[in-house]
Amino acid sequence: MLYLFVLAVIALVAPVIYANIKPITSNKRAKRILTTGIFSFFGVIAAITVVSMSGSPAFAQEAATAAASGGIASGLAYIGAGLVTTGSCIGSGIAVASSATAALGAISEDGSLFGKALIFVALAEAIALYGVLVSVLILNKV
């Protein structure tokens, strides 16, 4: 099992070493090295996950207890909580991106608009907090 962790570290470090040995001359080559490093690292992490969970009797017992206790309802609740949090955070990011740029533009022209601009950015950020609150409420029902 230790060899898989060593392989993950090598997969993370190898593209950086390769990029330092041969100088990057084009953007295309840099993107290829970065993509290779990312895919190799996460591939090794996926392999570690599969290997560690495939032969473990504790994992089999945990899966059997989860299936007996909650079934599909608890699994769908977890998926719902994840989707709520994901959607609210993406929506909040879009809202903050547009409102914060407009607020910075307004503040640069007139400094007295700082309070009003801060309120609009805070309202956009509150969307993510509402999503997290709803996901906590969903998880409390499970």
Image (cartoon, helix red, strand yellow):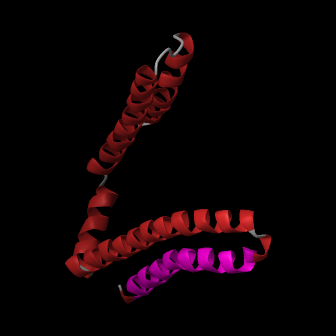
The number of callouts visible is 0
- Residue 121 lies, in percent from the top left, at 61, 74
What secondary structure characterizes most of the magenta part?
Answer: helix
Position of 49 relative to 4 (above/below): below
- Residue 103 lies, in percent from the top left, at 64, 68
Position of 124 relative to 5 (above/below): below
Residue at x 28% of width, y 73% of height: 66
- The extreme top residue here reads 22
Give 9 or 107, whichever is nearer the viewer: 107
- Residue 79 lies, in percent from the top left, at 30, 72
- In which quadrant is the N terminus drawn? top left
Residue at x 53% of width, y 78% of height: 129
- The extreme front residue here reads 109
Is 101 included in the stretch rendered in magenta? no
- Residue 72 lies, in percent from the top left, at 21, 77
Magenta range = 113-140
Q: Is residue 2 left or right of residue 51?
A: right
Q: Quadrant of residue 140?
A: bottom left
Q: Quadrant of residue 107?
A: bottom right
Is 125 included in the stretch rendered in magenta? yes
- The extreme right residue here reads 112
Give 21 or 128, whichever is nearer the viewer: 128
Residue at x 78% of width, y 76% of height: 112
Q: Is residue 88 left or right of residue 97?
A: left
Give 106 or 47, whichever is nearer the viewer: 106
- In which quadrant is the C terminus drawn? bottom left
Residue at x 48% of width, y 22% of height: 14
Q: Is residue 55 visible?
A: no
Position of 99 relative to 20 (above/below): below
Q: Is residue 68 left or right of residue 22?
A: left
